[in-house]
Image: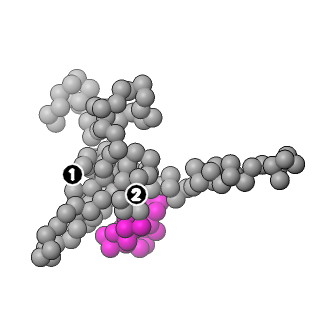
Amino acid sequence: MAWAGAPDPAELFEQNKAEDPQKVGREVLLEAWRNVYGSEPQQLKKVLLDADQVGHIACRARLGDAISDLVPINRLTSKSLSTLLQKFQNQWIGDFRIRKAPQSENSKSAANWYVECRVKDDEQPMAKTRRTAVTPLTVLAAEGVEGVKRGNSRL
């Protein structure tokens, strides 16, 4: 059909794949998570509490919004978030992937999760990066928190 002037089906498939809202939502979630917690493993209960706490860096980084875009608010629990994360665990989505931290076999505590970044900020020149790195301090500086703009990292 391409010879008759119709769009190439392979190109349409790639375009639809690139514009997948679920994939975009997952990437936004992973990026927000990474901006808040770095690569430190976190329990999902803590992530949800942080994202809901007014004034917490997770709230200002819109981590809660990113989560609620993927999980309906009325069903948002650490278990439902875990179910969602398991669907794309260990898959690269853009520059990020979500992983479960290793646990001992005898551990009875909830799993810890973390976001891994494919390219570390210090390994790639800024000219080649797609996004500006957002750290907790840059979020605070953007909001005009005293001391941050003057370079004082102790709040």
Q: Position of residue 49 (x, y in %)?
A: 27, 61
Residue occupying the point 27% across, 40% down: 136
Q: Which residue is under mark 2?
A: 91
- Up the image or down, 32 lies above or below 22; here it is above
- Up the image or down, 136 lies above or below 13; here it is above
Residue occupying the point 40% across, 45% down: 95
Is residue 89 in the magenta section?
no
Residue type (three-letter) at the residue carrying disc 2:
Gln
Q: Viewed as shown, does residue 64 lie left or right of 55?
A: right
Q: Which of marks 1 and 2 is nearer the N terminus?
A: 1
Residue occupying the point 37% across, 49% down: 96
Query: Depth check: 137 or 87 in front?
Result: 87
**Start-end of magenta stretch:** 64-87
Q: Position of residue 82 (x, y in %)?
A: 34, 69
Q: What element carries label 2?
A: loop
Quadrant in which the C terminus appears: top left
Checking the image for residue 40, the label placed there is 1
